[in-house]
Amino acid sequence: MDAISLATEMFQQYAQQPDPVLMKLGQLVKRYRKPIIAVSLASQLSHRSFLEDFQVVSYPTPERAVRVLSHMVDYTRFLNNKD
């Protein structure tokens, strides 16, 4: 077995393991019932589907996540000043 095949096999085995960070994130969502914005630099579909299961929005870059959070803050301010 060459090095590339071995690395691919090891990565696939790792990708099938539950990620402890994602598991903790799921617990936090259940416990606090607050919106959570995540940045997922990994393109693993299993992680994204896990986040979607807990209704966690994931963005591919920190800049996009910050921009969305900024819009959320602006919208909350708008709603609070509406009266």
Image (tube, grey):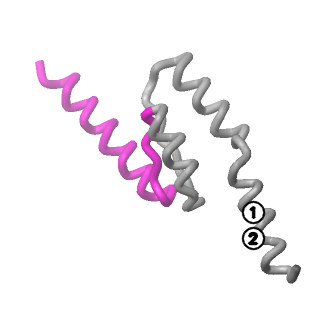
Tell me where residue 23 appears, x and y as whole percent: 66, 33
Look at the magenta stretch and give its main secondary structure. helix
Tell me where residue 51 appears, x and y as whole percent: 51, 40
Q: Residues within 10 Å of mark 2 (few under 14, many from 20)?
A: few
The residue nearer to you, when weighing 37 against 19, is: 19
Among all residues in the image, which is located at the extreme front?
1
Look at the picture and state if 76 lies above or below 69.
above
The residue nearer to you, when weighing 14 against 62, is: 14
Mark 1 residue element: helix
Q: Indicate yes or no whether the magenta region holds residue 77.
A: yes
Which span of residues is magenta-colored? 55-83
Say whether residue 31 is left or right of residue 23: left
Q: Residue at x 41, y 56 (%)?
A: 64
Q: In the image, what residue type sits under mark 2?
A: Thr
Mark 2 residue element: helix
Q: Indicate yes or no whether the magenta region holds residue 14.
A: no
Tell me where residue 2 appears, x and y as whole percent: 86, 83
The residue nearer to you, when weighing 2 against 26, is: 2
Residue 78: name its quadrant.
Answer: top left
Look at the picture and state if 14 lies above or below 22.
below
Q: Which mark is residue 11?
A: 1
Say whether residue 7 is left or right of residue 64: right
Q: In the image, what residue type sits under mark 1?
A: Phe
Q: Residues within 10 Å of mark 1 (few under 14, many from 20)?
A: few
Q: Residue at x 43, y 30 (%)?
A: 35
Look at the picture and state if 51 lies above or below 48.
above
Tell me where residue 22 appears, x and y as whole percent: 63, 39
Is mark 1 in CB contact (under 8 Å) with mark 2?
yes
Look at the picture and state if 81 lies above or below 57.
above
Which residue does the numbered mark 2 point to in the structure image? 8
